[in-house]
Image (cartoon, rainbow, N blue to C red):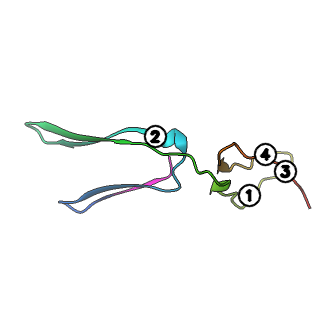
């Protein structure tokens, strides 16, 4: 999960970057002290984009010769876009 968490003593923040449909679900923030525990929950529903788009683009990759190179990206669109790989 590509996210950033922030807490300044009063405000709590969870920021999800480039959400994808499989990030949908229940998210819970839990506060704990020695005496008690409190939670606050909310549901996130991510609807797929109608237009094809990259929700996570490829990153620069450096590997040692003989090792496996793996490129990862995420796409969205309805209907699902056709994916083609090229090497130039």
The one of 76 and 7 positioned closer to us in this rendering:
76
Q: CA distance from mark 3 to mark 2?
A: 28 Å
**Mark 1 residue element:** loop
Q: Which mark is residue 61?
A: 1
**Mark 4 residue element:** loop
Depth check, mark 1 against mark 2: the one in front is: 2
Residue 87 at x, y percent in the picture:
90, 57
Q: CA distance from mark 4 to mark 2?
A: 23 Å
Q: Which segment is the magenta one? A: 1-5
Residue 58 at x, y percent in the picture:
70, 57
Q: Residues within 10 Å of mark 4 (few under 14, many from 20)?
A: few
Image side of residue 76 versus residue 66, left or right: left
Q: Residues within 10 Å of mark 2 (few under 14, many from 20)?
A: few
Residue 8 at x, y percent in the picture:
23, 63
Q: Which residue is mark 3?
A: 85
Q: Which residue is mark 4?
A: 82
Q: Are marks 1 and 2 in contact (CB under 8 Å)?
A: no
**Residue drawn 43% across and 43% down?**
45
**Mark 2 residue element:** loop
Depth check, mark 3 against mark 2: the one in front is: 2
Pointer 3 or 2: first along the chain? 2
């Amino acid at each position: 999960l590509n996210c950033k968490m922030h807490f300044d003593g009063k405000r709590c923040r969870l920021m999800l970057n480039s959400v994808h449909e499989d990030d949908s679900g229940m998210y819970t923030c839990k506060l704990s002290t020695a005496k008690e525990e409190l939670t606050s929950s909310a549901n996130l529903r991510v609807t797929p984009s109608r237009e094809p788009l990259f929700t996570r683009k490829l990153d620069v990759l450096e590997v040692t010769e003989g090792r496996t190179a793996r490129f990862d990206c995420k796409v969205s669109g309805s209907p699902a876009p056709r994916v083609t790989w090229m090497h130039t």
